[in-house]
Amino acid sequence: MNTATPLNATHSGRAARKLTLSMLVTATYFMVAGGPYGLEDLIGRTGYSAVFVILLLTPFLWSLPTALMVSELATALPQDGGYYIWVSRAMGPFWGFQESWLTLAGSIFDMALYPTLAVGYLNRFAPQLTAGYRGWMLELAMIAVCAGWNILGAHAVGEGSLVLNVLLLSPFALIVVFAAIRPAAPVAAAAPAHADLLGGIAIAMWNYMGWDNLSTIAGEVDRPQRTYPLAMLGSLILVELSYLLPIAAVAHARLDLRLWSTGGWVDAGRVLGGSALAMAVAAAGVIGAFGTFGTLMLSLTRLPVVMAADGYLPRPLTRLHAKTGAPWVSIVVCAVAWAACLPLGFVSLLIIDVLLTGMSILLEFWALVALRIREPDLARPYRVPGGLAGAIALGIPPLGLVILSVVRSKSEQIGATNELMIVLGILALGVVCYFLSAALRRRTAAR
C-alpha cells in the first residue's frame, strides 16, 4: 500500500506541532457531542424519563464499545488514515474502500447538520438574522470559515477547540445552577402520548457518534499509543456529564415538553435565566456547531488524502499547504460537497447519517476481530480484554443498535422513497465505485 505525504510535517521539513492529550480530548468531545445541542428532539419525542434511560444505556451499548475498539486499533496502527488503514489491513482493499465510502457518504449528510443547528439557534433568539436567504448565507459562511481554520493546520484546530469548549459549556453550567434553585413547577411535564422510542434511539446514537474520527490524524498526535486510550476515557466522561447534568436540571424544573424541538435550549435558558441566558445559550449553540464542524473537518479531510495516495481518488487531493501542511485541496473539495446538502431537513439528514456511519463502525469492529485472528502477534499497547471472544462480543451491542436504526428508517420518507432505499442505493454505488476506481488505478499503473 502506498502512503500519502506525511501530514505531521510541513514542506519546509520542520516538524509541525502535534495534538496533545488535552487537545485530543476537547477535539474528540466536539466530534462526538459539541454540547447537549441536538438532544432537544430526543426530549420532545420521548419525555424526560425515557431520555435518562436512553442516555444511560446508549454509552454502554454504543460509545464504550466503540471507544475500546478505537483505543486498541489506534494504538496498534497509529497511522494517518485511521479506520481506512485498519479495515484495509484486516480485510483487504475492497472493504477498506467501502469503509471510506461509507464514512465520506455519511459525512455528506452529517456535516450539513451543524450549519443547520447553528442557524436554528440564532433563529430562536434573533429570527431577523436568519430570515430568507440570510440563513443560507450564514450556513455557507460557517463552512467557509471552518475551511480557513483547518487550512491553518491541526494544531490550530486543537488549540481553538480548548477555548471553544469553555465557551460552549459555560451557559449550561448556569442552566444547571438556575434550575437547581428555581422552584419546580407544580405539575410535572407529561410524557408524549406516542413516544417515538426508535427515533429517540437514532438521535441518541447520533449524539454519541464520532469516537473513531480522530484516528485519521494519528500521525499528528503526540505519543498516540499513550494519548488515544486516555483521550477516549476523558472524552466519554465529559460527554456523559455534559448531557446528563443539563437534562437532569430541566427535568427537575419540570419545563414544558413543548419547548423541546431544535433550538429548544434557548427557550429553556429564557425560562430559567431570562433573555441574557437565552442569548448566551444561543451563542453557545453557534459555538458548538462551529467547533463540531471544524473538528470533524480536521478528521474527514485526511481520509481522501490517504485514498488518493493509494490511487483510489485523484492525486491532486494529496496536495498540502506549503506552510501549515494541511491538505488544502481536500478541505476545499469536501467543504463544497457538504454545502450541497444544506437543503435537506434535520431528522432526514440524521437518520441517513446514523445508518451509513453505523455500518462503517461495524466494519471497524469486524477489523478488530480479523486482526486478532490474522495478526495475533501485532503489538497492541492497549488490548480489549477477553481475548478473541471479548473482541467479538464488543461489536454485538452496536450491531443491535444499527439494526434498530434500519427498522426506524423504513418510516422516514424523502420525496417518494424512504431512507432505507436511499442507503441501499449508496451501498450499491460504493461497490460500483470501487471497481471503477480499481480499474482506473490499474490502467494508471500500467502506463
Image: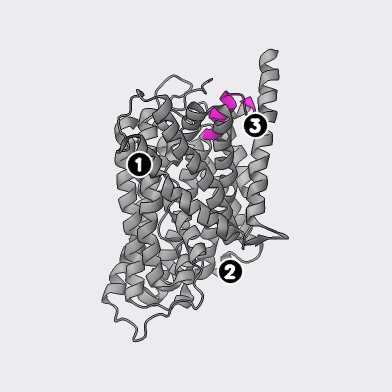
Q: Amino acid at mark 3?
A: Tyr
In the rendered image, residue 181, in percent from the top left (x then y), is placed at 26, 76
Q: What residue sits 44% from the left and 39% below the top?
A: 365
Q: Give the vertical position of 209 relative to 159 (above or below).
A: below
Q: CA distance from mark 1 to mark 3?
A: 30 Å
The answer to which image quadrant residue 419 occupies is bottom right
Based on the picture, tell me whether residue 298 belongs to the magenta stretch: no
* Mark 2: secondary structure: helix
Q: CA distance from mark 3 to mark 2?
A: 46 Å
Sequence-wise first label, 1 or 3: 1
Inspect the image, locate mark 2, and give the three-letter code of the amino acid beneath it: Gln
* Mark 1 residue element: helix
The kind of secondary structure element at disc 3 is: helix
Instruction: Look at the numbered discs 1 and 3 and tell me whether their residues touch, using CB distance below 8 Å.
Output: no
- Tell me the kind of residue under disc 1: Leu
Q: Which colour style is shown?
A: one colour
- In the rendering, which numbered label is found on residue 434? 3
Task: Tell which residue pokes out farthest to the front in this image.
Answer: 389
**Marked residue nearer the N-terminal end (3 or 2):** 2
Camera sees residue 351: yes
Specify the principal SS of the magenta part.
helix
Asked whether the residues under the numbered discs 3 and 2 touch, taking CB atoms below 8 Å apart as contact, a structural biologist would say no
Residue 68: image tag:
1
The span shown in magenta is 303-315
How crowded pointer 2 is (Cα within 10 Å; few <14, some 14-19, many 20+) is rated as few
Q: How many marks overall?
A: 3
- Outermost residue to the right: 416
Residue 44 percent across, percent down from the top left:
48, 71
